[in-house]
Amino acid sequence: MTEFRIIDLRTGIIEPEVTVKSISPEKAAEEALGVQVVRSGKPKHLVCRIYWTTNGTTNMIRFYSQTAHPHS
């Protein structure tokens, strides 16, 4: 399993990062934050950033909340 660092961006106060070992960035976010996320969305639906290192390279992805109305 890979170790992921999750930065919760849902509030104006940035909390210390959470580290989770998981099989994917999506699963890491779900385990750490208790919400399902998607890889694309509007900035107002931004939930978190997740970082991990592969072969000495740091990777980052932004995750957004799933909305009941995909066009909102």
Image: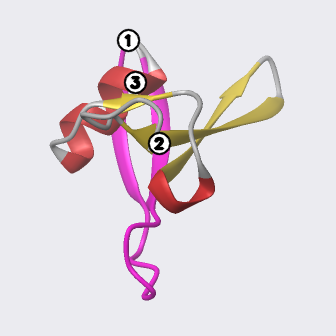
Residue that label 1 marks: 23
**Which numbered mark, 1 or 2, is in the foreground of this view?**
2
Residue 53 image position (x, y, % from top left): 69, 30
In the foreground, 9 or 23: 9
In the foreground, 70 or 46: 70
Q: Helix, strand or loop at disc 1?
A: loop
**Residues drawn in magenta:** 2-23
Alpha carbon separation for disc pair 1 and 3: 9 Å
Residue that label 3 marks: 26
Residue that label 2 marks: 64
Q: Quadrant of the C terminus?
A: top left
Q: Residue at x 38, y 48 (%)?
A: 19
Give the left or right position of residue 34, taking residue 14 as reference: left
Q: Helix, strand or loop at disc 2?
A: strand
In the foreground, 71 or 3: 71
Residue 41 image position (x, y, % from top left): 56, 38
Question: Can the viewer see residue 46 in this picture?
Answer: no
Q: Quadrant of the N terminus?
A: top left
Earlier in the chain: of badge 1 and badge 2, it is 1
